[in-house]
Amino acid sequence: QVQLVESGGGLVQPGGSLRLSCAASGIVLDYYVIGWFRQAPGQEREGISCIMPSNGRTSYASSTKGRFTLSRDNANNTIYLQMNDLKTEDTAIYYCAALRSVTPNPNYLNPKVHLNWKVYRNWGQGTQVTVSA
């Protein structure tokens, strides 16, 4: 059974940093695409980044590019989202999700697909990030 557990959220001041973790069990990360999403109150869930852990290929939404960085720890089956220079508009619940990839080819990663929350079947419970002075 696939299980994803996010952690690392909290309250941070504008300009600060947080590192979120997505710990996976029941799957081998090499065979999946992992996406990070966020949802603010009253807004649609937004895709912010995705990674193919098998080869390290990543993609970022324009709203987070240059500030957020994905990394992987395959030995611990964990994906990290390092968030720097946080802004008040980054306040949201952050989720990770897993989608089985059909090929290890890094060209498979397609932000138009893998930043769309509707294609993912397996989700974590979310972690709250609040950016406020």
Image (cartoon, rainbow, N blue to C red):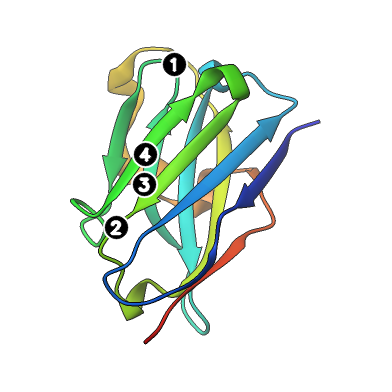
Q: Nearer the viewer, mark 2 or mark 3?
A: 2
Is residue 121 rendered to the left or right of residue 41?
Answer: right
Numbered label attached to residue 70: 4
Picture residue at 32% right of the left edge, 67% below the top: 16
Q: Which tag, 2 or 3, sits closer to the chain's start? A: 3
| Residue at point 28%, 20% (across, down) | 107
Q: Kindly report which numbered mark, 2 or 1, lies closer to the viewer in this rendering.
A: 2
Indicate which label's residue lies in the foreground, 3 or 4: 4
**Considering depth in this image, is 8 or 77 the residue closer to the camera?**
8
Splitting the image into 4 quarters, where does residue 8 fall? bottom right
C-alpha separation, residue under disc 1 versus residue under disc 3:
16 Å
Look at the numbered discs 1 and 4 and tell me whether their residues touch, using CB distance below 8 Å. no
Marks 2/1: CA–CA distance? 25 Å
Q: Neighbour class for label 2 at 10 Å: few (<14), some, many (≥20)?
A: some
Q: Earlier in the sequence, mark 3 or mark 4?
A: 3
**What amino acid is labelled 1 in the image?**
Ser
**Residue 118 at what x, y percent from top left?**
53, 52
Residue type beneath disc 2: Asn
- Separation of marks 2 and 3 at Cα, in angstroms: 14 Å
Cβ–Cβ under 8 Å for marks 3 and 4: yes
Q: Position of residue 121 (x, y in %)?
A: 64, 43
Q: Is residue 45 visible?
A: no
Image quadrant in which you'd find residue 133: bottom left
Q: Which residue is mark 3?
A: 49
User: Which callout, 1 or 4, points at the residue further toward the start of the chain?
Assistant: 1
Q: In the picture shown, does residue 92 fall above or below 52? A: below
- What residue is pinned by disc 2? 84
**Label 4 with label 2: CB-CB less than 8 Å:** no
